Amino acid sequence: MAAEKRECMIIGASPIRGGGAFKEFDLESYYIICADAGFETAQKQGVKPDLVVGDFDSAKTKPPADVKCMTLPVEKDVTDTMFAAMKGLSKGYRDFVLLGCLGGPRFDHTLANLEVLRFLRDHGARGYLADERTKVFLISDEKLTVTGMKGATVSVFPYGCMNCNVSYTGLQYPLSREDLTAGGLVMGVSNCITADKAVVRVHRGTALVAVYTG
């Protein structure tokens, strides 16, 4: 991989309103893969991808000939976004950000993109989903440190397990090695960052952490 391309950015087909989601990233340091209609988002934001992949069932038009493109079959076992993640891994990238992969008209696509995060984690990589106001992380036996987001809302859920054991610091409602249980009455919804640095640590299991700045 090129020396300056330290991380991988995947742009999906879910709508991104405005260009705020891109402003925090130094795009020159990312290998950028567009998944299907994510290429249209990249065009609107003036972002030049390194690669476009997809079956183009959700795209209005295919990318022009001067854009590196891999056309995938419509009938396949993985989504275009998952294929993009697999390509990024094959190129040696281990840090990913997925834009245009939250919300949109189909809830099942958002769920599928959570599975992309799990796939990345299971293959020794880290990734998160992001849009203008939300970041979603999947963490296991590690800690997530959030800085400079005082006032943001944080919600934590067990993911792919019946419960996860967590600790929080820098949040309005701290926890110390407490269990969050799937379908249980102790829910980690709508906590608030009250310090310049907040930490969510997972001691056991896997947790889905959503940080909302709206």
Image (cartoon, rainbow, N blue to C red):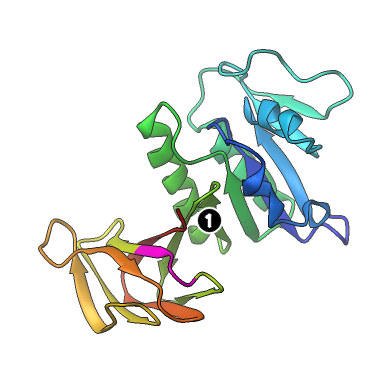
Question: Dividing the image into 4 quarters, which one contains the N terminus?
Answer: bottom right
Q: Is residue 81 above or below residue 2?
A: above
Q: What percent of the width, then of the height, locates residue 135?
A: 49, 56
Q: What percent of the width, then of the height, locates residue 197?
A: 50, 81
Closer to the camera, 5 or 161?
5
Q: Amino acid at mark 1?
A: Tyr
Crowd band around label 1 with a 10 angstrom C-alpha radius: few (<14), some (14–19), many (20+): many
Residue 1 visible from this viewpoint: yes
Q: Residue furthest bottom?
A: 176
What secondary structure do most residues of the magenta stretch adopt? loop
Please tell me whether residue 184 belongs to the stretch shown in magenta: no
The residue segment tinted magenta is: 150-154
Instruction: Classify residue 66 as left or right of residue 49.
Output: right
Q: Is residue 155 above or below residue 10?
A: below
Instruction: Classify residue 206 as left or right of residue 88.
Output: left
Q: Which residue is mark 1?
A: 128
Residue 86 visible from this viewpoint: no
Residue drawn at the location 51% of the way across and 24% of the way down: 76
Q: Is residue 15 above or below residue 28?
A: above
Closer to the camera, 211 or 148?
148
Residue drawn at the location 82% of the way across and 18% of the way down: 64
Residue drawn at the location 48% of the way across and 30% of the way down: 77
Please tell me whether residue 151 belongs to the stretch shown in magenta: yes
Q: What percent of the width, then of the height, locates residue 145?
A: 50, 76
Instruction: Classify residue 10 as left or right of residue 192.
Output: right
The quadrant holding residue 161 is bottom left
The quadrant holding residue 95 is bottom right
Residue drawn at the location 37% of the way across and 64% of the way down: 154
Q: Is residue 205 above or below residue 24?
A: below
Q: The residue tagged with tag 1: helix, strand or loop?
A: strand
Q: How many marks?
A: 1
Q: What percent of the width, then of the height, locates residue 92?
A: 72, 57
